[in-house]
Amino acid sequence: MTQLMAMPEQAATAEPLAIEVRGLTMSYGSRQVLRGVDFEVRPGEVFCLLGPNGAGKTTTVEILEGFRQRTGGDVRVLGVDPADQRARLRERIGIVLQECGFPRQARVAELIDIWRSYYPAPRPLASIDGPSRGRRACARVRVRHRRHRAAGPREAGRGCRGSPS
């Protein structure tokens, strides 16, 4: 097992932490992959986890996202324990997946509608087609003219490793 190393702590401030990890442990059966990981990330701070393959970087991030249950320790992201309040946390964070995939026949607008459903008060899907801020946002990220096309790797899957070809 490789020890995960975090960047050195900076001087404490009164501002609440964006991420706080104390004594984080994770085991898969008898194999311990995280042992006593501690770090803090302040709002606006750039933070990175560095380590070789198998060091526990992905496991740590999945725990922070609420996708994986930890074996022990305390974790707070934006003041929320990801294990206890996953839905509340996901309303407030954005995640870029390492790999992604979706049905080959799905249209860009259909995928946008699916992603919208993850949030409690999303903009109406009709705002993508109508003269609204949503339409301008889609035009700005260059998907408006593609919204009725199949979402293949040249459309919505741009930049995602593992996209269907």
Image (spheres, helix red, strand yellow):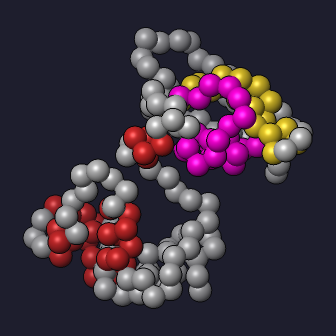
Q: Residue at x 75, y 37 (%)?
A: 26
Q: Residue at x 46, y 37 (%)?
A: 85
Q: Quadrant of the N terminus?
A: top right
Q: Quadrant of residue 156?
A: bottom left
Tell me: 57 left or right of 55. Answer: left
120 to 163, vertically: above or below = above
Query: Does residue 55 appear anywhere in the picture?
Result: no
Residue 71 among magenta residues: yes
Q: Quadrant of residue 162?
A: bottom right
Q: Residue at x 77, y 25 (%)?
A: 36
Q: In this figure, what is the number of numbered marks? A: 0
39 to 15, vertically: above or below = below
Q: Residue at x 66, y 22 (%)?
A: 22
Magenta stretch in the rendered image: 56-76
User: What x and y, as percent, mark residue 54?
Assistant: 82, 48
Q: Quadrant of the C terminus?
A: bottom right
Residue 45 among magenta residues: no
User: What x and y, as percent, mark residue 86?
Assistant: 48, 43
User: What x and y, as percent, mark residue 74?
Assistant: 62, 25
56 to 71, vertically: above or below = below
User: What x and y, as percent, mark residue 135?
Assistant: 19, 69
159 to 91, vertically: above or below = below
- Which is nearer the eye, 21 or 144? 21
